[in-house]
Image: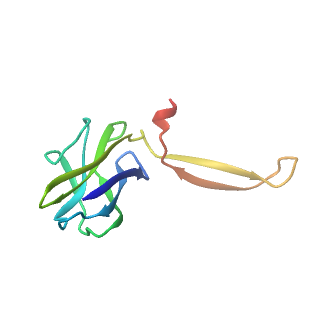
Amino acid sequence: PNIQTLEPETITPNSAILKMNISSPGDSAITEAGWVWGLNPNPDITDNKLNITSFTNGVKSKHLTGLTNLKHYYIKAYAINSYGIVYGEEIDFVTPQKDYDVFIRVYNDSDFNAYDGVKVQMSKFIYDFM
């Protein structure tokens, strides 16, 4: 199989959305696919797994839960067919300490008279900026 590990999205203190691309199943049908992950580099099939159920070509994503804040995780996409196991590139990420709420004040004139505010939630790599 031809697969790629894609950058995870929406990384929170306890979860992340993992993504992979299946470009081609190869000469044999894929029988299992998903991600391997762990706290150490180079995770493999004997480590934690998150499986998908559709093996058609294209981008796949799945929500990985049960993570711990401020931990460094390593992930790789994988696929299995009758020829064996293929792994995608390893990608690593750090879960943030917590979700942050940010209040943005919007001003309606040059005298800075506030007229509205918007509250947005950010789950970003706050850890990276410390």
Picture coordinates of residue 101, whole percent (x, y): 54, 48
Q: Report the residue at 30% width, 56% height from top.
A: 3
Q: Report the residue at 49% width, 38% height from top.
A: 126
Front residue of 19/79: it is 79
Q: Report the residue at 31% width, 40% height from top.
A: 73
Front residue of 106/51: it is 51
Q: Which colour scheme is used?
A: rainbow
Q: Report the residue at 32% width, 68% height from top.
A: 57
Picture coordinates of residue 8, whole percent (x, y): 39, 51
92 vs 79: above or below: above
Picture coordinates of residue 49, whole percent (x, y): 20, 52
In the picture, measured across the screen, residue 19 lies left or right of residue 115, that is: left
* Image quadrant occupied by the N terminus: bottom left
Tally of marks: 0
Q: Residue furthest front?
A: 27
Front residue of 104/79: it is 79
Front residue of 92/59: it is 59
Picture coordinates of residue 48, whole percent (x, y): 19, 48
